Amino acid sequence: MLQGNVRLALLDEPFRGLDRGQRRRFHANARLWWPDATLLCVTHDAAETLSFNRVLVVEGGRIVEDGSPGLLASSASRYRDLLNAEDSLRTELWTADWWRRIHIEAGLVSERS
């Protein structure tokens, strides 16, 4: 992110490992850093793309959808299916009782039910 004057910035899973809020902030900062560039961001997190201007959905090496996230998300689309699948998985994982919930605070580890 040091080169400031670029026409195209390719970001391939650039902020993987950060939480969703941090990734959102870094994406916003990338847009500020390269205000006149095209940002091509590769991600497997469909919800992360909701703030983008344009989304390309690629399956099997081919573009199967191309449009604004808002329009694609509000219609019957593969993009909408991806968002729904992510949401269902997140809900299932956070509500499953077979997960151990470990909390770390001030260097102390505790388990929560």
Image (cartoon, rainbow, N blue to C red):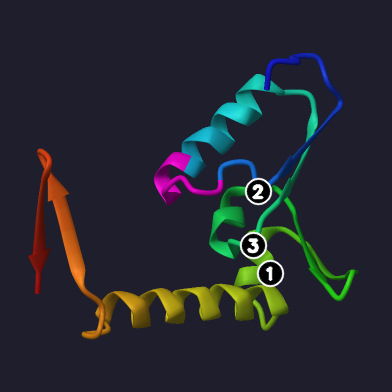
Where is residue 54? Give x, y as percent: 74, 52
Check disc 3 and give the amino acid type: His
Residue found at x 10% / y 65%: 111
Secondary element at tag 3:
loop
Q: Label 1 near label 3: C-beta < 8 Å?
A: no
Q: Nearer the viewer, mark 3 or mark 1?
A: 3
Can you identify the residue that label 3 sits on?
44
Check disc 1 and give the amino acid type: Leu
The answer to whether 47 is drawn above or below residue 77 in the figure is above
Q: Nearer the viewer, mark 2 or mark 1?
A: 2
Residue 72 is labelled as 1
Specify the quadrant of the image occupied by residue 10.
top right
Within 10 Å of disc 2 (Cα), the crowding (few <14, some 14-19, many 20+) is few
Where is residue 74? Give x, y as percent: 60, 73
Residue found at x 63% / y 29%: 30
Q: CA distance from mark 3 to mark 1?
A: 16 Å
Q: Quadrant of the N terminus?
A: top right
Within 10 Å of disc 1 (Cα), the crowding (few <14, some 14-19, many 20+) is some
Where is residue 99? Give x, y as percent: 25, 78
Does the magenta portion include 55?
A: no
Can you identify the residue that label 2 sits on?
13
Q: CA distance from mark 2 to mark 1?
A: 22 Å
Q: Label 1 near label 2: C-beta < 8 Å?
A: no
- Which comes before the other along the chain, label 2 or label 3? 2
Q: How many marks?
A: 3
Check disc 2 and give the amino acid type: Glu
The answer to whether 55 is drawn above or below residue 15 in the figure is below
